[in-house]
Image (cartoon, rainbow, N blue to C red):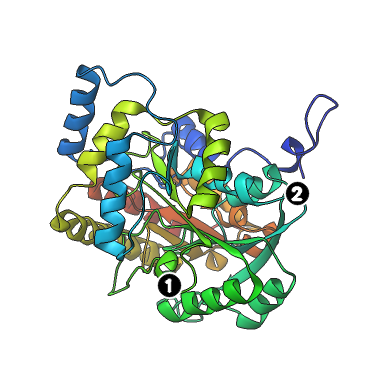
Amino acid sequence: MAATGKRVSAKAGQFTESVIREMTRRAIQHGAVNLSQGFPDFPAPEEIKRAARDAIAADINQYAITWGAKPFREAIARQILKWRGMAIDPETEITVCCGSTEAMIAAMLAVVNPGEEVIIFEPFYENYGPDAILSGAKPSFVSLHPPADPAGEWTLDEDALRTAFARRPKAIIINTPNNPTGKVFTRRELELLRDLCVEFDVIAITDEIYEHILFDGATHFCLASFDGMRDRTITINAMSKSYSVTGWRVGWAIACPEITGAIRKVHDFLTVGAAAPLQEAGVAALALPENYYRQLAAEYLERREALLGPLREAGFRCFVPRGAYYIMTDIEEFGFSDDLAFAEYLVREIGVAVVPGSSFYRDRRSGSRQVRFAFCKLLSTLEEAGQRLLHLKKGKRT
């Protein structure tokens, strides 16, 4: 827990700044290849950039409707109907936010009362912990267990999960495909979660931002489309990952009218609204043909393989992701005292920035033998990182 002074709130004192963003700053400082923060170093699709420029030129530069421009909300509704078979009312069930990050905290502030439990799978995307603190929630962590075979799946502990539900939490956060593990929750796992949510009257908040980045035959399932979940799921998504525009900060939350009404009130006073011209560009993004998404997944598969080879050659034990664009690795072979020391050595001496695994766990000791690599980069960037990492193999340190 971070220390606080008299002028700093207790909430702000309970978490640190983002470790992921700090590693990007360290990469810049040392001239390292940045495989820490999950943003692409390649261009966004030209059609989307053109649509944004055209919107600005057309003077779409003032406030959109607080909960999102009507054409963009309608485009989101068309997408959900086409891909997930769900009929969504864009007037009462969609809130456009400043990225999925804001959508998540707005959703939690909208449905969670102080002291109510929220289940979070760990390892978890680092924002979820501070989101729980800021919303006054009490986080309840359930572990995802790494596979004995690196090519296997991270697994749920059903007994631990049922124990957590038996404490009557208000909500559960489900991130699939998952950051940082690359796990894609199966239909059976989501059916289990559905059954528990219905039995214990729990709201599911699903972060589905990597839904189109899938490998090895994996399938993404939207929990809200399962029987019994339509009115108890908040589905969060954004343009950032599917369209390589992480800096645009345009996301959305989909929920039943009652919950959407609460999210919209919170969102209004958090940020007022997302950038109007970029919402217009979002309409063009969501109109891209099916082939775009097939090509997106194929290109990320090529990048995954381009990084897995050098990592293995350098001595890492890699957990092969089936979705998203991260590789979690075991660093036991390198003999360092912990992940922080190893990450510092990598960025300073080897010239490659990664995220220490402990930033994804409640108890940092649980991730002290792991680091995460992002492969949302040009093949030339990954090749350069691979060449640098080979020096690590030749000179392991303690």
> In this figure, which residue is indicated by the disc labeled 2?
114
Front-lying residue, 168 or 25: 168
Number of the front mark, 2 or 1: 1
Q: Position of residue 28 (x, y in %)?
A: 44, 32
What amino acid is labelled 1 in the image?
A: Phe
* Label 1 packing within 10 angstroms: few (<14), some (14-19), many (20+): some
> In this figure, which residue is indicated by the disc labeled 1?
226
Q: Position of residue 152 (x, y in %)?
A: 43, 79
Label 2 residue SS: loop
What amino acid is labelled 2 in the image?
A: Pro
Label 1 residue SS: loop
The answer to whether one can see residue 163 in this image is yes
Could you tell me which quadrant the N terminus lies in? top right
Q: How far apart are the alpha carbons under marks 2 and 1?
A: 29 Å
Front-lying residue, 250 or 318: 250
Question: Upstream in the sequence, badge 2 or badge 1?
Answer: 2
